Image: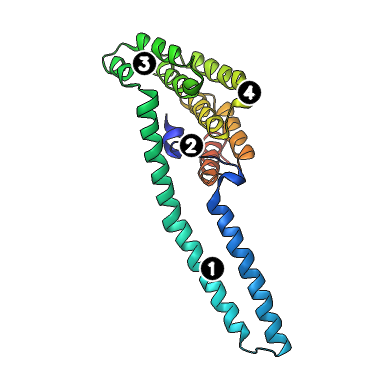
Amino acid sequence: MRISKLLGAAADHYRFGDDPLRFLRIVIGTFLLAGTAIAILFAVTGVAPRALVLAGALWAIYGFATALITGVLEPVIDLAAQAFSSVGLSRVGGYSAIETMVARGQYEAAAEAYRERAQGRREQVDATLRRAALLAGPLAMPSGAVAELRKLRQDMGRRLTAADDVRIGLALADLHEFSLKDPGWAMAELRRLIDLYPHSRRVRQMRSILAALKTEHFGH
């Protein structure tokens, strides 16, 4: 699914408390603002005329720290999260037998196997998303895929995590845009994700895709 691939696997948590690097930036910035205020006070009162030099040094340190977090820590954490996520899926999910059916062209049997796996609470979202991909693709039933994903979101209710909500929303957006040719619904799903999870590290990408869809379909 093209929208989902553009954004990557949205398996991270998007609320403020789930982004420790964002919190770290705010903590560092708070300390530097306090240090700058003290330095300016010392310089103005004449206690330490060269304190403004210290303030400049503090903000240089802040720039370096921000670059380190954005350019080094975030990619490393994302890579580690993807690695651990893959390990967990291969151990707990164990979809290799079903994927073999898909490779052999046994699409109906594979879709039914995913439906059975979705009965388990731990695999409910992942198995349903995989089933929806088969329904929308080889089985040519995109409307059925949309219906099952919407039912999944409704049935889970408060049990639905932010990460799973995003995965389902992106899959629905993809289905509406590329399978059902209904860009209005696709853009509504993207708008919903952006509004619900504004602190996502991927929100800029989602906004870009939403803007591109608006330009493509409406010329603005």
Q: Where is residue 50 in the image (x, y as percent from the top left)?
A: 61, 88
Residue that numbered label 2 is attached to: 10
Q: What residue type is labelled 3?
A: Pro
Element on which disc 1 rests: helix
Residue that numbered label 3 is attached to: 138
Quadrant housing the C terminus: top right
Instruction: Evaluate if marks 4 and 3 touch, with contact meaning CB atoms under 8 Å apart.
Output: no
Q: Residue 157 carries which label?
A: 4
Q: Where is residue 39 in the image (x, y as percent from the top left)?
A: 65, 80
Residue that numbered label 1 is attached to: 62
The first of marks 1 and 3 along the sequence is: 1
Element on which disc 2 rests: loop
What is the C-alpha distance between the residues marked 1 and 3? 52 Å
What is the C-alpha distance between the residues marked 2 and 1? 29 Å
In this view, the mark in front (4 or 2): 4
Q: Which amino acid does label 2 sit on?
A: Ala
Q: What residue type is labelled 4?
A: Gly
Instruction: Evaluate if marks 1 and 4 touch, with contact meaning CB atoms under 8 Å apart.
Output: no
What is the C-alpha distance between the residues marked 3 and 2? 24 Å
Q: What residue type is labelled 1?
A: Tyr
What is the C-alpha distance between the residues marked 1 and 4? 42 Å
| Relative side of 162 to 111, left or right | right
What is the C-alpha distance between the residues marked 4 and 3? 29 Å
